[in-house]
């Protein structure tokens, strides 16, 4: 017992040491050729949204999916061709009910949205055929009707199941925009050395959650080599949504107020445990990429699925990860690899444009 206590004490004391990597969670990596506002890529105006929305289900259920849905439903030029649900932030029943509740509120305010399609409630074995969920069949039908931009706000389980064995439909994915991926040696540490939350100001460490929910599905989708953009933690960490932003949404009433009310627990979690005044809006930023891609600074890069040897050397921890770098960084043990666009930062206007879009007051996006 004394030994356990000693180990815990040493771990706590270690957190107090001024080691930069422990503060930010980020180790040096070869730079990527990031382009301000680009590179621009073609994307179909027809959009399919796959979501694990759990907004307000509990204090640690983020509202980002609901914010992304709210933004896209209020964005001129975006045709939402389909909405599907997947397990992740909460069990599928919760994600499905939450998504349907929000869609009903948006429709009450005049939005023209398709019926929500229920998807996978767990990871699927890629070698074992199973009857398709409604979402899988619906996504296939939508692709048969024409090209789609697919926005994956959760795991890639539904996307992989719908595209499996359908090379004809794979060619109709104009772009897959996914909220996942990281640089080698980067753990998600939102206190970033500036918070005043738990663990001597370090706060909790996040996973690359959407990838971690179903790594095999992500690897199989990557192997298809679809046109793909990753909108990861790297980009979202530059934006804070705080209490003032949610007061503005609450003041509008309707769907915006409903989302704002369900964001309060998550905001309190970031303020109390992480020690920041607001939270990083991960999925919302991916939605914004569809509306106004020039708000994000991105690079053409290579993504692969492999253990992170950098973290193994430092932390002795190497689960499979979706890593991004340059072609010359590709390790020999990679399970799958493909070129991607990786978004690593945002424009100074991004916060204002996000709020304008959420409030329905954004001007049409420029070229």
Image: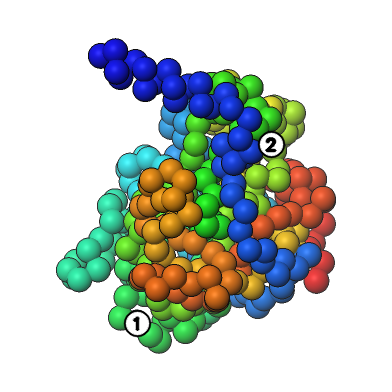
Marks 1 and 2, Cα distance to the nearest angstrom? Answer: 40 Å
Q: Is residue 241 above or below residue 349?
A: above
Res 146 visible: yes
Q: CB of mark 1 within 8 Å of CB of mark 2?
A: no
Residue 91, x across and y down, in percent: 33, 42
Residue at image coords 36%, 52%: 319
Neighbor class of circle 1 (other Cα within 10 Å; few <14, some 14-19, many 20+) is few
Residue at image coords 61%, 75%: 44
Mark 2, secondary structure of its residue? strand
Towards the viewer: 152 or 234 = 234
Quadrant in which the C terminus appears: bottom right
In the shown orientation, is residue 215 left or right of residue 190? Answer: left
Mark 1, secondary structure of its residue? loop
Looking at marks 1 and 2 on the same chain, the residue that comes earlier in the sequence is marked by 1
Res 143 visible: no
Neighbor class of circle 2 (other Cα within 10 Å; few <14, some 14-19, many 20+) is some
In the shown orientation, is residue 241 left or right of residue 118? Answer: right
Q: Quadrant of residue 266?
A: top right
Render colour scheme = rainbow
Residue at image coords 66%, 58%: 344
Residue 209, x across and y down, in percent: 44, 48
Residue 360, x across and y down, in percent: 74, 48
Residue at image coords 64%, 38%: 20
Pointer 1 residue: 166
Pointer 2 residue: 241
How many marks are shown on the rendered structure? 2
Residue 30, x across and y down, in percent: 63, 63
């Amino acid at each position: 017992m004394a030994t356990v206590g000693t180990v815990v004490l040493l771990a706590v004391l270690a957190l107090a040491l001024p080691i930069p990597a422990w503060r930010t969670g980020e180790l040096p990596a070869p730079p990527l050729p990031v382009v301000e506002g680009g590179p621009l890529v073609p994307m179909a105006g027809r959009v399919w949204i796959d979501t694990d929305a759990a907004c307000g289900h509990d204090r640690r259920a983020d509202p980002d999916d609901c914010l992304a849905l709210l933004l896209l439903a209020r964005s001129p030029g975006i045709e939402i061709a389909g909405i599907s649900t997947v397990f992740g932030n909460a069990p599928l029943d919760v994600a499905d009910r939450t998504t349907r509740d929000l869609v009903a509120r948006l429709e009450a305010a005049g939005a023209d949205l398709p019926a929500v399609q229920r998807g996978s409630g767990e990871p699927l074995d890629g070698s074992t055929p199973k009857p398709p969920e409604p979402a899988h069949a619906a996504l296939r039908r939508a692709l048969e009707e024409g090209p789609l931009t697919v926005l994956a706000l959760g795991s890639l389980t539904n996307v992989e199941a719908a595209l499996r064995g359908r090379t004809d439909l794979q060619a109709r994915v104009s772009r897959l925009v996914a909220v996942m991926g990281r640089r080698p040696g980067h753990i998600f540490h939102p206190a970033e050395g500036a918070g005043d939350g738990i663990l001597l100001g370090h706060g909790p460490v996040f996973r690359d959650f959407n990838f971690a929910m179903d790594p095999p599905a992500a690897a199989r989708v990557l192997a298809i080599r679809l046109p793909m953009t990753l909108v990861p933690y790297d980009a979202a960490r530059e934006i804070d949504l705080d209490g003032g932003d949610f007061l503005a949404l609450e003041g509008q009433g309707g769907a915006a107020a409903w989302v704002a009310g369900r964001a309060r627990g998550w905001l309190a979690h970031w303020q109390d445990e992480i020690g920041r005044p607001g939270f990083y809006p991960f999925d919302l930023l991916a939605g914004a990429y569809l509306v106004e891609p020039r708000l994000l600074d991105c690079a053409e890069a290579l993504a692969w699925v492999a253990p992170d040897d950098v973290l193994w050397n430092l932390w002795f921890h190497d689960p499979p990860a979706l890593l991004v770098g340059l072609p010359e960084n590709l390790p020999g043990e990679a399970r799958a690899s493909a070129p991607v666009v990786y978004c690593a930062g945002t424009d100074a206007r991004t916060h204002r444009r996000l709020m304008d879009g959420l409030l329905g007051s954004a001007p049409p996006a420029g070229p």
